[in-house]
C-alpha cells in the first residue's frame, strides 16, 4: 500500500508543496552537469543587437502581401480547432468510462502537431488537409481530456432534481451542459489561441503560414522583415478578442474556406500503401522474427536522445517555475505604483508576458540557436521563458482577484508573506499541467538540430524511413504519457485553475 499524502500524516499542505518543489529543483540541480550548455557562437551580442534593432525598427516595406499568410494562419487555426472540438466532445462523454478511449486520447495528444504534419505530409502534400489534420488529431485528444474534466465538475443537484425517468440525453442537455457551457467555450477560445501559434509553426515544414516567412527571414538575417512579421503576429494575438468575437465566427469560418483551397487529389492506392506498408517494418509484415532483430539493430542508439529529452523537459519545467516566480509581479496590480506611472509599469509588464507567451517555443529556440549556437541552452531558455511567462500571466490574473489582508507591507513582504503562500498551490498545479506540454515541445526542438528524439524523427522523415519514424514517434508518445501520469500524481489536488493549460 502506498504511503498517504503528507497532509494525512499531519503535515501542512504548504510544507508538502515546498517539499515537492525542493525535490524537483534538487533533482534538476544534480542532473544539470549532464546537460550540454555551451555557448558556441563567436559573437552572440552583435547578432542580438541586430535582432533587437529589427524588432524596434521593423521593415514594413519589405513585406510582400503578408495578408495571404495571415489569412491562411487564421483559417488553419480556426478550422483545425473546430474539427478538434467536434471530434473531442463525443470522446469526452465516455472519457472516464473507457480506458481504451483514455489511452487513445493520451496517445494522439502526446505527439506534437508538427510531427503529425510530417506524417500527413507524405500523403496529402503541402495542402490544407495536412495542416487541418495535423491540428485536429492532437486537439481531439486534448479537448476530450479537458472537456471531460470540466464535465466531471458539474454540480449533481440540478440533475438529481429532474423527474424520475428522465432520459440520459435530456439530463445532459438540460441539467449539465448549460452549467458548464461557459467553461467549455472559454477553454475552446484558449485552444484557438494555441491553434494560432501551432498554425504559425506549420510554416517550419513548408506550409505558407506566417511561420514560413518568419523562418526564412531569420535564417537569412533579414531581421527588419522578421521584426515586422513578429509584430503582425503579436497584433493578431492581442486583438483576438475583437476579430475573434463569437458573433463573427460564422462569417470567419465561411471566409476561411476560400483560403484553405485548393484541396488535393488523394490517390487511394498510395494512401493505403502508406498506411499498410510504408509505416511498418518489412520484417514485421513478413513475420520474420530474425529480420526484426536486424531491423531493430539498425535503429540509432537512442539512449542519449532519450536522456536529453527527459533532462531538457525537467530543466524546462524547473526553469518555467523559476521564471514564473520572478515574472508574475510585473503584471500584478499589487506591485504597480499609483497613478499613470503605475498603470504604465503594469502595462509594460503585461505586454512583455503576452509577447513571451505568444511566441512559440520553437520560434524562440530558433532565435536563441542563431545567437548561442547548437546546444541544449537555447532550448532550455525557450522552454523556460515561454512557459514561465504563460504561467506568470495566469498567476498575476489570479493575484489581482485577491485582497491584501496585511496592508502596509513593503513589496518584498507582500510577495513573500501575503501573496505567494496563497498563490503557490495554483502556480504548482499549472506547472504540473504544463509538464506534458513541455515534454512534447522538448522532443519537437530536435527539428532544429538539438539532440533530442525529435532530431531522429525529423531525420527519418527526411530520408523517407517512415517505419523508423513511426517507431520513434511511439517512443516519444510513451515517454509523454509516462510524464503525464507522474505529473498527475505530483500536482496539488482540488486546486481550481484560472485557465486550463493542457
Image (spheres, rainbow, N blue to C red):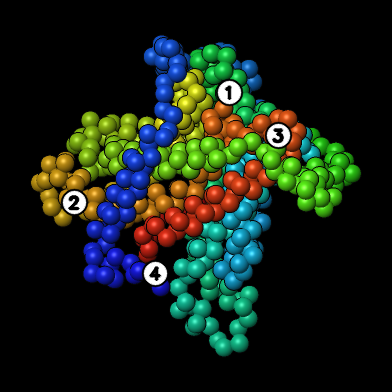
Q: Secondary structure at mark 2?
A: helix
Single out the mark in the foreground, 3 or 1: 3
Alpha carbon separation for disc pair 3 and 1: 20 Å
Kindly tell me whether residue 231 is visible in this rendering.
no
Classify 10 Å Cα crowding around label 4: few (below 14), some (14-19), many (20 and above).
few
Residue at x-position 57% and y-position 88%: 164
Sooner in the amino-acid sequence: mark 1 or mark 2: 1
Residue 320 coordinates in the image, percent (x, y): 38, 41
Single out the mark in the foreground, 3 or 2: 3
Residue picked out by circle 2: 418
Classify 10 Å Cα crowding around label 1: few (below 14), some (14-19), many (20 and above).
some
Q: Secondary structure at mark 4?
A: loop
Where 337 sits versus 111, above or below? above
Where 42 sits versus 334, above or below? above
Residue picked out by circle 4: 2
Residue 138 coordinates in the image, percent (x, y): 62, 49
| Residue located farthest toward the front when viewing the structure as drawn | 290
Amino acid at each position: 500500500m502506498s504511503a498517504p499524502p503528507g497532509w494525512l500524516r499531519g503535515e501542512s499542505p504548504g510544507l508538502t508543496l515546498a517539499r515537492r518543489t525542493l525535490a524537483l529543483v534538487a533533482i534538476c540541480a544534480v542532473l544539470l552537469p549532464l546537460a550540454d550548455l555551451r555557448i558556441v557562437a563567436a559573437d552572440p551580442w552583435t547578432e542580438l543587437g541586430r535582432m533587437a534593432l529589427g524588432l524596434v525598427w521593423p521593415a514594413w516595406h519589405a513585406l510582400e502581401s503578408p495578408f495571404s499568410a495571415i489569412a491562411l494562419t487564421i483559417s488553419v487555426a480556426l478550422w483545425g480547432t473546430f474539427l478538434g472540438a467536434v471530434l473531442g466532445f463525443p470522446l469526452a462523454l465516455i472519457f472516464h468510462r473507457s480506458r481504451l478511449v483514455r489511452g487513445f486520447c493520451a496517445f494522439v495528444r502526446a505527439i506534437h502537431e508538427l510531427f503529425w504534419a510530417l506524417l500527413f505530409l507524405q500523403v496529402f502534400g503541402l495542402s490544407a488537409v495536412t495542416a487541418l489534420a495535423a491540428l485536429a488529431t492532437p486537439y481531439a485528444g486534448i479537448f476530450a481530456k479537458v472537456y471531460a474534466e470540466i464535465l466531471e465538475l458539474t454540480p449533481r443537484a440540478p440533475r438529481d432534481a429532474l423527474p424520475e425517468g428522465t432520459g440520459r440525453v435530456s439530463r445532459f442537455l438540460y441539467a449539465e451542459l448549460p452549467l458548464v457551457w461557459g467553461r467549455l467555450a472559454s477553454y475552446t477560445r484558449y485552444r484557438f489561441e494555441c491553434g494560432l501559434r501551432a498554425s504559425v509553426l506549420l510554416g517550419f515544414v513548408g506550409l505558407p503560414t506566417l511561420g514560413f516567412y518568419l523562418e526564412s527571414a531569420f535564417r537569412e538575417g533579414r531581421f527588419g522583415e522578421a521584426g515586422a512579421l513578429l509584430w503582425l503576429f503579436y497584433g493578431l494575438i492581442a486583438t483576438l478578442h475583437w476579430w475573434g468575437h463569437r458573433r463573427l465566427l460564422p462569417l470567419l469560418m465561411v471566409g476561411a474556406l476560400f483560403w484553405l483551397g485548393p484541396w488535393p487529389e488523394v490517390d487511394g492506392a498510395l494512401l493505403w500503401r502508406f498506411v499498410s506498408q510504408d509505416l511498418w517494418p518489412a520484417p514485421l509484415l513478413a513475420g520474420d522474427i530474425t529480420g526484426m532483430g536486424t531491423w531493430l539493430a539498425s535503429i540509432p542508439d537512442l539512449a542519449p536522445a532519450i536522456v536529453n529529452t527527459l533532462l531538457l523537459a525537467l530543466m524546462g519545467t524547473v526553469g518555467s517555475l523559476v521564471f514564473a516566480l520572478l515574472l508574475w509581479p510585473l503584471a500584478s496590480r499589487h506591485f504597480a505604483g499609483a497613478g499613470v506611472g503605475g498603470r504604465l509599469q503594469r502595462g509594460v509588464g503585461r505586454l512583455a508576458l503576452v509577447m513571451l507567451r505568444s511566441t512559440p517555443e520553437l520560434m524562440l529556440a530558433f532565435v536563441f540557436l542563431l545567437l548561442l549556437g547548437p546546444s541544449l541552452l537555447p532550448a532550455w531558455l525557450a522552454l523556460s521563458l515561454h512557459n514561465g511567462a504563460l504561467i506568470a500571466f495566469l498567476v498575476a490574473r489570479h493575484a489581482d482577484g485577491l485582497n491584501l489582508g496585511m496592508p502596509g507591507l513593503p513589496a518584498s513582504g507582500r510577495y513573500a508573506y501575503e501573496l505567494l503562500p496563497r498563490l503557490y498551490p495554483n502556480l504548482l498545479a499549472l506547472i504540473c499541467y504544463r509538464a506534458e506540454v513541455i515534454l512534447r515541445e522538448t522532443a519537437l526542438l530536435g527539428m532544429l538540430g538539438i539532440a533530442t528524439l525529435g532530431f531522429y524523427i525529423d531525420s527519418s522523415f527526411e530520408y523517407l524511413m517512415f517505419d523508423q519514424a513511426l517507431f520513434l514517434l511511439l517512443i516519444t508518445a510513451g515517454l509523454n504519457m509516462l510524464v503525464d501520469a507522474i505529473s498527475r500524481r505530483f500536482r496539488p489536488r482540488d486546486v481550481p485553475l484560472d485557465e486550463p493549460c493542457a
